[in-house]
Amino acid sequence: PDESFTLRIRGDAQTDGRFFAGDAEELGVDQLYLRRARVNLQGTLGGRYDFKLMPNFGQGRVEIQDAYLDARFTPALAVQAGKFKVPLGLEWLRSPADLHLVELGLPSALVPRRDVGVMVHGRVAGGRLSYELGAFDGALDGQNADGDATDGKDVAARLFAQPFLSGGGVLRGLGLGLAATWGEESGSLAAPAVASYRSVGGRMVDRLRTGTADSTTVVADGARVRYSPQGYLYSGPASLVAEVVVSTQAVRLGAASADLTAMAWQVVGGYVLTGERATYGRLRPAHPLDGSGGFGAVEVSARYGELRYDDDAFPLFASPTANARRTQAWAVGLSWYPTANVRAMANYERTTFALPDAAGAAAALPSENLILTRFQIAF
Amino acid sequence: PDESFTLRIRGDAQTDGRFFAGDAEELGVDQLYLRRARVNLQGTLGGRYDFKLMPNFGQGRVEIQDAYLDARFTPALAVQAGKFKVPLGLEWLRSPADLHLVELGLPSALVPRRDVGVMVHGRVAGGRLSYELGAFDGALDGQNADGDATDGKDVAARLFAQPFLSGGGVLRGLGLGLAATWGEESGSLAAPAVASYRSVGGRMVDRLRTGTADSTTVVADGARVRYSPQGYLYSGPASLVAEVVVSTQAVRLGAASADLTAMAWQVVGGYVLTGERATYGRLRPAHPLDGSGGFGAVEVSARYGELRYDDDAFPLFASPTANARRTQAWAVGLSWYPTANVRAMANYERTTFALPDAAGAAAALPSENLILTRFQIAF
Amino acid sequence: PDESFTLRIRGDAQTDGRFFAGDAEELGVDQLYLRRARVNLQGTLGGRYDFKLMPNFGQGRVEIQDAYLDARFTPALAVQAGKFKVPLGLEWLRSPADLHLVELGLPSALVPRRDVGVMVHGRVAGGRLSYELGAFDGALDGQNADGDATDGKDVAARLFAQPFLSGGGVLRGLGLGLAATWGEESGSLAAPAVASYRSVGGRMVDRLRTGTADSTTVVADGARVRYSPQGYLYSGPASLVAEVVVSTQAVRLGAASADLTAMAWQVVGGYVLTGERATYGRLRPAHPLDGSGGFGAVEVSARYGELRYDDDAFPLFASPTANARRTQAWAVGLSWYPTANVRAMANYERTTFALPDAAGAAAALPSENLILTRFQIAF
């Protein structure tokens, strides 16, 4: 090409250990695995046309995570087309290399992940307000989409403000946002098009009834609406991120129908013990382990979150003896950053379940105690 | 390596919308999807040894499209080994980022796509004549191959002349060619090794009978020959491309055998409204949309094509009530090129079908009205 | 990143022909295929943190072969985490672009391939001694792993000495090593977790009994131990590589149990007819075919190897009429290197089988005569 052309090649590799502690119930297999292994090709053509191609080779699979064109006409108006993250969940929108903990929390189970669509977006008011507005195929909660099984499409919108970005006070690192999606979804026996939720340990937590006939399978049948108030505060070495996600879907089982709502929220925070400034982006150690005597940075993190499933789902649409009405999870973590690009992590996460039929809890969904480790390089 | 080494990294991403207009018959699902998302690694070692590696991550799948070594001993003699496009169809051999319309036309359904093989090729007479001659595993019509299910191999050859390349007249942009493949194919119940054809909308148009026994399944049994006269004319802002593809395969059904021939042809043309010169390669806007006041280039395109299936196929080898004897398709399209690397497209394509049993047409193969959109970045 | 950052992009493509000679028994399909097509992203961050990401797109599949972080604290101590080659087999640890012959020999069927794990490694004594010590999920013999199906993990260790590395004598290119793995493996009907072995032609050579019930399926049930003495000698244009691999697994079939051992060994050698120095790495032609009159380098190679399966396996754990007690293979090959990055190869390999039930050999495992060709570019 004879136009100006900038290409950046980046990538990351995360090697995780996942161990079930006190695992008398054999909830899962202890293992080492590649959580993510991504090649990231980004560039700019002619000064204003960005592209990104990022396949992920982790977990023994391959998928394209990001593949898009982004035409930045002005800072306030850009048009993006391709496959990318749906602008809804705050934790989900952050790079997985920079999160407080190894795995995403409960609210991220309720947001659509990556989807194919077209989106206008931009920043106004000196960067203090950003917006996204797009149309997408309509991925299910917690799922990616490479196409659609139904004609209906989803609209997603998000507003995010950093009102004190240009100031110097304690609220300089404050961000507050509101995001939502709207759409219609009509499922079928072959593709029910309803969401189900799993724990961090990979166990099914909430699932609507499925069978071999229309009369025994819950299918989507009407409006799907999600919304999410969200915010963060970064102040010196401390950080706090909070979000709520509410997801409602009209469903039908034979002649019965209902609007079922799942709600999740969490608060996650961190503190950099070595004193570096915490940011939404990459943490940069003041004294990296590079042979000059530094040791890098150390951060502690903690999270608490809940997922509440609609009481109206039980017993008609979901089994009261196999699904959680309330899931609670807390986690603590330690991160060591020898350099800005390398990170070693250890987390402990405990998840407990309350079932509609209290007696069923111990048998169907025993508490989950998970030890997670990670060796990460992100360049 | 201590040799001279040139590496070029390129890629493209195409985000398509596909909508069935007036779709009372529910012929397909309206959707957005990644048509192609490709990373393209090309280079030259020691001045004469080229390589190319190009995986495609589009449509929720991954496959290597091109992977080859090309040893250019002289301009007239190069040896290429690996997986690459079989030199047969003219439209198929062009980069999909530069085609007149969003999707390939009917003749491209009859040509083998990418195959593994070894090929000699070169240019003689000052570039006015180019040739390709290769041996391949033998992909089916419209299919890619990563290996072979039968011992038989295919030979492919193509001659293409640009007789007035060095002149200055109206025929400077004229190209004429002839290509063919020869091979033997012996199918089996498990792998019948016979071609079937689909419409642009993805619906099956022609398919030979398949069953659960040898006596009810049509299999390849002998010579497969394809040939294709082809040509183009590029003149100022106008372009015209025409090709015919004929594909004949000896088949057998129990004791009955026949040589079945499918034939397709099309004419496709374009006109650049903003006056830039049309070429076989990339269109370059004279005034790109880069903030300096330009708007880019605009091109209109149109296509008409037909696919004729062998009358002898009916009713013994193919059902006369479910397959088209003649398929006709016309399409119109509009392309906007803000820059040479970015393209937005909208197409309308209508396909109609004539069945041997005329009464069956409406029910089995209703007319298809397709609206196709594309956002493309190719760098 | 603001740290020092070095990125190297490399890759290779191997286009192979595989032909069964005198193949009256139809042992396999003659075909051309992409044996490997790999993109290799390697780099160093901050001077001491290496990464590698290498997906392979060959054989119509995609998998990540290498994906790791390697933190080199000192030459004697590095920590590597991710997916990479298990440090056991000598032939297996070499780059497939540099091997004497097209395909790996029999000992490589007994070593775990790539696995996910964490490993310390380094070089001491001026590079004369290198070591690796790691923990891995525990891949089966001849297999890759992206995770684990059982809680047990494997430990692997390897010592390799080049005692005369700094001298100038004939033993300068001598290397001797010893490697081993230890672990526990407990299989099940769904995942028996026992190894099976195939010939270079892809035919099953040794397989334990599998059925539809616990009582008819052999499963792993206890210690798995492998060890491998290994060595090479490179001297001028000549090279000789030898290794033995012994793999023992405790197995169970219903109430019966046993420790079954497979053993394989081979000697492979080469001689560069054009006189260049043979090395463990890439052969560099003194006079490459680059238009300056050179023709490149030519090397001849030969191999003999055996695989012996445990007599105790027959007849209880493995069928004596379908599995080989002893497999013998010899191969000869010719390689032409027009340049250091391009290689054309032709091999002939003959494999014969001795069954416990001698009468069964001809029918179940006829001798295999394989002609293998390769066009390779590795940059």
Image (spheres, coloured by chain):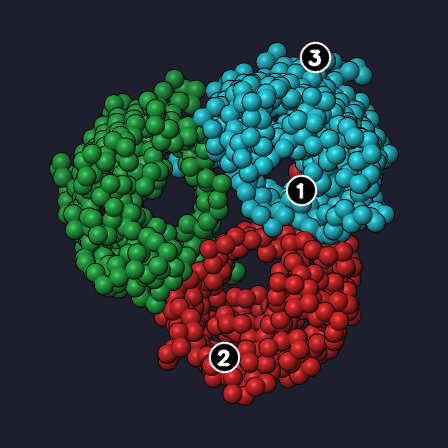
Chain colours: A green, B red, C cyan
Residue at mark 3 to residue at mark 1: CA–CA distance: 30 Å
**What's under tag 3, amino acid-wise?**
Pro
Type of residue at label 2?
Leu
Alpha carbon distance from label 2 to label 3: 76 Å
Tell me: B280 left or right of C308.
left
Q: Which mark is residue A157?
A: none
Report the side of A73 relative to C299 (left or right): left
Rendered residue at 58%/53% (across/down): B64
Name the residue carrying label 3. C163
Give the Cα separation between the discs numbered 1 and 2: 50 Å
Residue A228, image x and y in percent?
19, 50
| Chain to which mark 2 belongs | B
Hey, which quadrant is residue C158 in on the image? top right
Chain of the residue under label 3: C
Same chain shared by disc 2 and disc 3: no
Above or below residue B5? Residue A19 is above
Provide the secondary structure element on which disc 3 rests: loop
Q: Is residue B100 left or right of residue C302?
A: left
User: Which residue, given by chain and number where applicable, does mark 2 sit on?
Assistant: B365
Indicate which label's residue lies in the foreground, 2 or 3. Answer: 2
- The residue beneath circle 1 is C378
Which residue is rendered at x = 70% and y = 26% of the image? C314
Residue A170 image offset from top left, x and y in percent: 13, 36
Q: Please say if C304 is above or below B283.
A: above
B305 lies above or below C88: below
Q: Is residue A128 above or below residue B93?
A: above
